[in-house]
Amino acid sequence: MTRFAHRSLLALALSAPAAPWTVAEPVAEIAVTERGVIGVSAWDLQRAGIDPGEIPVAELGVTCAGVRVASSVQDVNGDGLFNGADVVVFFGQTLRDEGIYRNRHTDKNVYLLERWVEGVMPPAPSERLPRLGPGRPLPDSPVSLQRRVHIERDAGWADKFATWREAATDFTYMSTLDFLRHSERTVPFDAPGVDRHAGAPFSVAVMLFGRSSASRFRHQGVTDHSVIVELNGQRIGLVEWDGVTEGYEVLTGLDPRLLRVRGNEMVFRLNRRERVDIDVVHIDWFEVQYPTFAALTEDQAEFAIPGPSAGQTFEITGLTSADIHLLSLTRETVLPVEVHAEPSGTYGARFTAPCDDGLYAIATRQGLSRPASVEAFTTAMPASPAEGIDYLIITHSLFRPEADRLAEFRAGQGMRTMVLDIDDVYDAANFGIPHPDAIREALRRIVQTWPAPALRHVVLMGDASWDHHRISSANPTFIPTHYYHSGEGEYSSDAHFAIYDDQDAIPQVAIGRLPVKTPEEARGAVDKIIAYEQDLAAAGAEGDTGWRHRIIFAASDNPMYRDFLDRAVERFIEGNFELQRAYANDESPLDCTQMILDAFAEGVSFVSYVGHGARYIWQTGTTMARRASDYEANFNPQYVDQLDNSPRLPIVFGITCFTNNFDNPDPRNCIGEKLVLSPAGGAIACIATSSYSYVHSDLAFCDLLFDVLFTDEPQRVGDLFLGALQRPSTPRDVRQMFILLGDPAATLPLTPLPGAPGPRPEADASEASGEAPEIPLPASSEII
C-alpha cells in the first residue's frame, strides 16, 4: 500500500453536487477544529444571535468550500421547522494540505449552514441509496470491522529555511532522535475497542524525516537512516531510507494481541551501525489500524470495513441511545439505519454497506461533537460596487480603528479607500475558511472586475507567524502570508497575492505590510506615517528639505559589494545627491555602524545596505556576531531602538539575508520590522527578503530598484517596488522573495539636488528586450 493510498482512508471524499441549486442565504458559519460527527442545534444558533425564524428543515443543508456535505436534520418536535432541540448533523474534519495531515496555516475548517430554495436543492444524501432491505446475510463475526488511531503531536520545527525541503513537506515534528542526546523515544497511545483475539492482523504506518546524510558509505550498502520500531516491548519493524527527506513505511501482518486498549508504548530507536556516527531523525507521526469489536464502548466512533462488503448488512451494538446517526465517509452519504433495543439496555443499529472498503462514522445524539464556534455568516466586502478603489487596507478587528484612521488620512489626499476585516475577506472569497488564498482571490476580484479607479496600493495591517499551531510562541497570525518555495528555499511572499497569471508571475498591485502585533503598535505605526506625510507636505519647496538630498550606501567588508555600490554611485548618484559611503573595514570595526547611525540622526532619505546579514544583524562590522563585542560592532535592532529621527524617515533597501523575516514566531522583531515600527524613528519603508538572499539574483534586482528609483522617479514607495517587480528582466523567483514592509502609498522622500543633471545614460537595449542587464556579478547562487 502506498503512502497516499494509506492516508486516503482518513480523507473525507467531497463529491460534486448532484444538481444545480440556488442558495437563498447562508445562515451560520460553523468552525470545526477536530474531526467527528458534528451536531448543531437551533439553540446553538440562538446563542450565537441568529434567529432561525421559520426555516423549514427541508431547506437546510451544509456546505464546505462550496461543495455540499452529507447532512441530516433531526426535526425533534415534528413541526417541519428548525427550532428548539432540532439538530443538523454532518461529519466535519480539519483542513489538510496535500501530503500533510495538518494544514500548515490553520487548524480551523469552516462549514456553512445554508438555506436552499425548495424545489431546486439537490436530493438528500439518503435518497441516493435504496432503503435498508434484507441485504445479504449478516456476517457471523464482527471481526471485519477496523479502527484507526493517528498520533501526531507537533512539538518543534525542522529547518524551515533549508533549500532541500519540498514545498509540501511538513516541517513540524513530534520529537527528534540523534546519537548524542536521545537515541530512543517512547510515545504512548490508546487503542479503544481493539479486538485482541481477532483473526485479522493490524498494521502500523510510520512517517519519519531524516536530517543527516551518510552518503559517503552508500556504495557499501549503508543507508543514511535506520530506525527500529517497537510496540509494547516487541520489535515490529525496521525503517531505512536515504536522503534528507521523508522516511515512510507501513508495517503489516502484526498480531493484534500486541495491542492494549490503554497504555500502549511505541518506541523509536536509532539503529547503531558501523561507520555511521551521525543519524538525525524527526518523528513526524504514526497511525495504527486494528480490528475492533462491533460493540461500542463510546457514543461516537469511526470504523472501516475492509475488503468486499457492498450490499452486506452489518450491525453495530452497544449504543446508549436509539437516536443514532450513521454516515458513509467514503461515499459522503447519510445512511439509513434499523435500530433495535438489546436485552442489556443498549441499542443496535443495522445498515447496508454502500461500497467495498468503506469508512464510516457513527454517533448517538449524546455523542455528537460540538463545533468550535457558531457565528452568523456576514461579509462587508461588496461583490460589485458602483465605484472602484485605489487604496485598500486588509486588517484584523483588533487594529480596525487604526486602519480606519489611516484610510481616512489617505482619502484626504484624494485616494478612494476601503478597509476590510480579514474575516470579511475569508467569508467573501473563501467560504469563511481562514487561508491566505482568500486574500489573493479577493484582490483578484477587485483588480479584474471592479470599476475604476484601478487598485494600486494594498496594506496588510497585521503580523504573521509560521508557527500557525502556536507550538512554541504566543504570537498569532493576524494577516497570513503566502509561502513560496523556490530552489533556494521557502519565502514568505506577500507579492503572491497580486499575481493572477501564473505563467508570467507579474504582480498587478503594490502590497506592503505593517506587521503590527498589538493595537498600541498599530497606533504608533499610523501616527508615524501621518506625521511623516504631514511633515513632507508642510516643508514643501521652502522648508527643511536638505535631508531629502542625502543618501547613504553601506556594505560588508567585501570588494564585490563595494564595487557594486560604486557602480551605482557612478551612474545614479554623482552630482544628483549628497552621498555618504559606509563600508566595513578591518581597521575600525565600529566605523560603518556609527556612520549609519549618524546618518539617521542627521537626516537621510535613502539607506541601502548590501552584504552579509541575519534576522537581527547587518554585518557592518568585520565579522558576524559570535561574541557580544561582535554584535555591538554590527548594526542590530538595539541600535534602531535608539533612533529618534522621525518624521525624517528614509526608505531602506536591505540586500542581505532575513532583514524582513517578519513571520518568525520569535517575539523579537527583525531589523525590517524594527525600522518600520519603531515609534520615534527608523524608516518609512523597508524592501528586503524574508529569507536567504543570493548574490546574483538579488544584486541584479537591487540594480533594477536603483534604475526605477533614480530614472523613473516614482512618487510613492509602492510604485517603486511594483515598478521593479514588473520589469521583464526581474527573475520569477525574485518577484516572490522580496517583501515591502510599510505603507505602499507612502511618499518617497528622495529629492535630487537643485540643478542635478540626472542619471548618466546607459545602453538600455537589454531592458527593452526583456533581457537581464549586464552586471559583473559571480555566476553563482552564493548566499549574501
Image: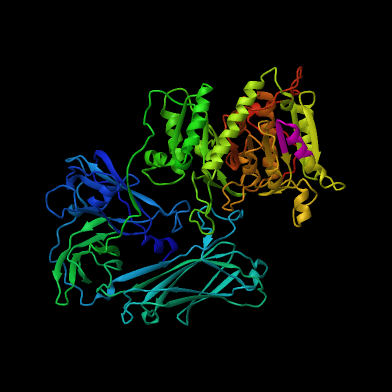
Rendered position, 351 above or below 169: below
Q: Is residue 637 magenta?
A: no
Left or right relative to 610: residue 240: left
Q: Residue at x 59, y 73 (%)?
A: 182
Residue 560 in view here: no
Left or right relative to 724: residue 596: right
Left or right relative to 769: residue 628: right
Rendered position, 449 above or below 155: above
Please state the total of marks drawn on the protein image: 0
Task: Report x, y in % for residue 580.
Answer: 80, 33
Task: Report x, y in % for residue 177.
Answer: 58, 70
Q: Is residue 604 magenta?
A: yes
To which quarter of the image does residue 274 belong?
bottom right
Q: How is the image coloured?
A: rainbow
Task: Report x, y in % for residue 725.
Answer: 60, 34
Of residues 348 and 647, the one drawn nearer to the viewer in this rendering:
647
Of residues 642 and 452, the one drawn nearer to the viewer in this rendering:
642
Figure quadrant of the N terminus: bottom left
To which quarter of the image does residue 319 belong?
bottom left
Residue range highlighted in magenta = 595-608
Q: Residue at x 36, y 37 (%)?
A: 379
Residue 51 in view here: yes
Rendered position, 374 above or below 700: below
Of residues 278 and 311, the one drawn nearer to the viewer in this rendering:
278
Task: Report x, y in % for residue 292.
Answer: 30, 74
